[in-house]
Amino acid sequence: MAPGTNEKQPTEAKDDERVTALRRFAAAGRNWRRAQLAGSAALLAIALTGGAIAFGASGTSGTAPMASSSAVSPGLLASGSLDASIASLQAHLRTQPKDSDSWATLGLAYVEQARTKGDPSRYPQAEKSLKRALQITPGNDQALAGEAALAAARHEFAQALTYADQALEQNPYSADALSSRIDALVELGRYDDAAKAADLADQRKPGVPVFTRYAYVRELRGDVKTARQVLRQALATATSKGDIAYVSAQLGLLAWNQGDYKSALDYYARALTADENYLPALEGRARAQAATGDRADAIKGMELVVSRYPLPQPLVELGELYEDRGAEGDKAKAEDQYALVEAWIALARANGVNADLDTALAAADHGDKADALKAARAEWARRHTVHTADALAWALHVNGKDKEALPYARQASATGYRNASFSYHLGIIELADGQQAAGRAALTKALKLNPGFSPLGARTARKALEASK
């Protein structure tokens, strides 16, 4: 039982609950091969609900790319340390239930646990812990910063910005609040304001959480050189294994986005030397292996990732790797992964997470196209970011609305962000709209920047270029 509350902590789901969960999703229209899915589906039920099976309306990577890192120091993310920290906080609060700072820290730790483990059932726990802190000490800046992180994790970015500003009124040097403020501004599409917020955070509280966000803001504006430089400086100053793993993985992702697979693999290797179980590095390594043609190791690696971390992006990527391999039975295995994406989205929604962008990204290529467009329009109504612009453009395209899609596809690249998937989507839409020269140029740009950006997308881009000659 959580310290000072009557709330039961999550426990593992029983086997019959897992089977019931699978059957309910099978009834929604997917053909589940229970023997093959048993491991992944059982893990999904445990990870996302902690035993409390709750279904919402069903809809990765992928998930919306958040502004980058956690507000919690990556040092807590070394293998097992976050869980250990939570256990220690719970034990402390059993004897000191009026310690508002510890309640705030516990709430923020729950947010991080949900984020790193794909477990939205932790968000209600985080909410209760943070409210408890504010009841004990109204205006507690740590609790307000935790509320900001929780709102951001639930994709309620306007609310996250409000809480971050309230926290900074109490403590202008709160690293958690400064970090969450950058996240919120980025995810609201307010990139100029996000850049100013990153500069301010760098002045007030330099450190790994701020450095990684600073780098991401620069990358979004097309300044890859500065992003790389900042991350390298952060890595040079990192001392804990968690920090080293985190920053190395960020450098690996930046290198992969630019098509530099050798550097990406080197950075992922460094991350995994620091923490052999660091999931973002395992996922990134598998992605880079796929881009270099090492499909067998890529599939093996991504299978390991989704067995521990069943979030939309790795599930979609594994499904596409199966499809790209094209062996007998692989299409069905791919469909299993896409079905699990739908399960994750439904369970996330049941725990208060806005999953419209996840729905739009996954459903456009691997689900109900009408659902993809509905979700993309809903997300665009809430926030105008490069990622939502790209998702809406692609959802419009797969629904045959290319003229309407084109302005959104162009807006996705308007900041200078170098993203091969965006260029691929733009090129395909331009070709569909009859703009042959522009479409070919965009597809060529995508393949030049990152020729292995997607197992299926890269293949489709090459075929479209050949067909448009």
Image: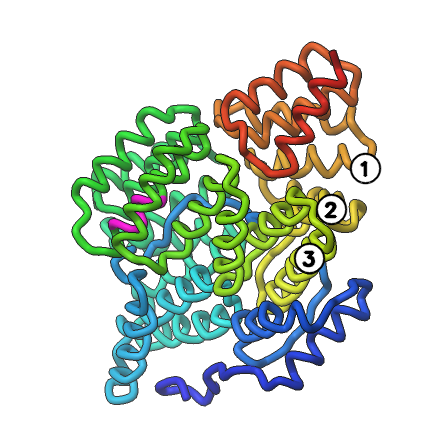
Residue 395 position, x and y percent, is: 73, 39
Quick check: 374 above or below 420? below
Write down the region rendered in magenta. 244-249
Query: Which residue is at 28% across, 77% downward?
Result: 89
Task: Answer with mark 3 or mark 1, whichever residue precedes in sequence.
Answer: 3
The reply to whether discs 3 and 1 touch (Cβ–Cβ < 8 Å) is no
User: Disc 1, disc 2: CB below 8 Å?
Assistant: yes
Main secondary structure found in the magenta portion = helix
- The quadrant of the picture occupied by the C terminus is top right
Hey, what amino acid is under mark 2?
Ala
Depth check: give the residue in front, 440 or 371: 440
Three-letter amino acid code of the residue under disc 1: Asn
Horizontal side of 380 relative to 298 (left or right) equals: right
- Of circles 3 and 2, the one toward us is 3
Q: Can you identify the residue that label 3 sits on?
A: 333
- For residue 55, which quarter of the picture? bottom right
Question: In this image, 305 relative to 338: left or right?
Answer: left
* Residue 168 shows in the view: no
Picture quadrant of residue 401: top right
- Residue hosting label 2: 372
Element at label 3: helix
Circle 2 residues within 10 Å: few <14, some 14–19, many ≥20: many
Which residue: 69% across, 19% down?
A: 465
Is residue 415 among the parts visible in the rendering? yes
Q: Which residue is mark 1?
A: 399
Q: Nearer the viewer, residue 182 or 291?
A: 291
